Image (cartoon, rainbow, N blue to C red):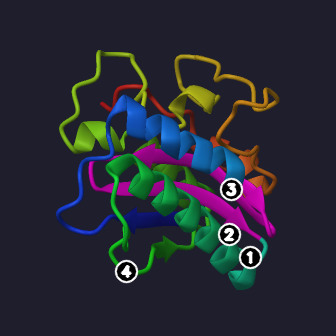
Amino acid sequence: MHVTLRIAQGLPYMRNGRIYGLLKQAFRAGRERFGFRLVHFAVLSNHVHLVVEAEGSVSLSRGMQGLAVRMARALNRAWRRAGSVFDGRYHAHVLRTPREVRNALAYVLGNARKHGAWLRRGAVDPFSSAMWFDGWSNGRRGFSHEDGDAPVARARTWLLGMGWRRQGAIPLVPA
């Protein structure tokens, strides 16, 4: 699934090193729970894109609720505030084909450029899970999921683990 989660209007930007570090801790703690796996993400100024696997609607709901609570607590602590952080419920889109999964991965991992973030040619977005991704067309290898520091889980489904690769690797800089 491709999930989008927006923060409420008027809150500070999330795309800075300190906030990203806190969000990575929240991702690490909630990356694999209740039959839910966080496989990829991108943190933007006012929203987060996630690519997740869930064993069903209950797993998705419980996993997203746990992840959102962890994120909200971390953000509220950092911003020295209380109250709602997210603007309503998350939006989820089920990915059913290898092409849809490949397109979602390219979209999520390259989303910073779409929103105007400047990234050096050939560089990955430092506020995303791109550094753990191993499907770049230039053969760039991602960091290992095996180290305890990875904020993402390894994909377990055929579609997200291997199936999307039938559509071709993803270029670091879109054509």
Q: Mark 3 points at which residue?
A: 30
* Amino acid found under the numbered disc labelled 2: Gly
Q: Is residue 50 magenta?
A: yes
Residue topped by disc 1: 59
- Kindly indicate whether the residue at mark 2 contacts the one at mark 4 (C-beta within 8 angstroms): no
Q: Name the residue under label 2.
A: 63
Ranked by sequence position, the earlier of labels 4 and 3 is 3
Classify the position of the C terminus by image quarter: top left
Of 102 and 108, nearer the camera is: 108
Mark with earlier residue (3, 1): 3
Q: Can residue 74 be seen in this view?
A: yes
Residue for badge 4: 88
In this rendering, position of residue 163 left or right of residue 114: right
SS assignment at label 2: helix
Task: Pinpoint residue 5: horizontal percent, then vertical percent.
Answer: 41, 66
Give the alpha-carbon distance from disc 3 to disc 1, as whole Å: 12 Å
Residue 115 falls in image quadrant: top left
Instruction: Give the foreground label among 1 and 4.
Output: 4
Q: What element carries label 4?
A: loop
Any part of residue 166 in sight: no
Label 2 – label 1 distance at C-alpha: 6 Å
> Predominant secondary structure in magenta?
strand
Q: Quadrant of the N terminus?
A: bottom right
Q: Does the magenta stretch include residue 37?
A: yes
First in sequence: mark 2 or mark 3?
3
Q: Which residue is drawn at 69% across and 34% down?
A: 150
Q: Pointers 2 and 1 in contact (CB under 8 A)?
A: yes
In the image, the segment drawn in magenta is 30-54
Q: What residue is drawn where x is 45% and y is 74%? A: 90
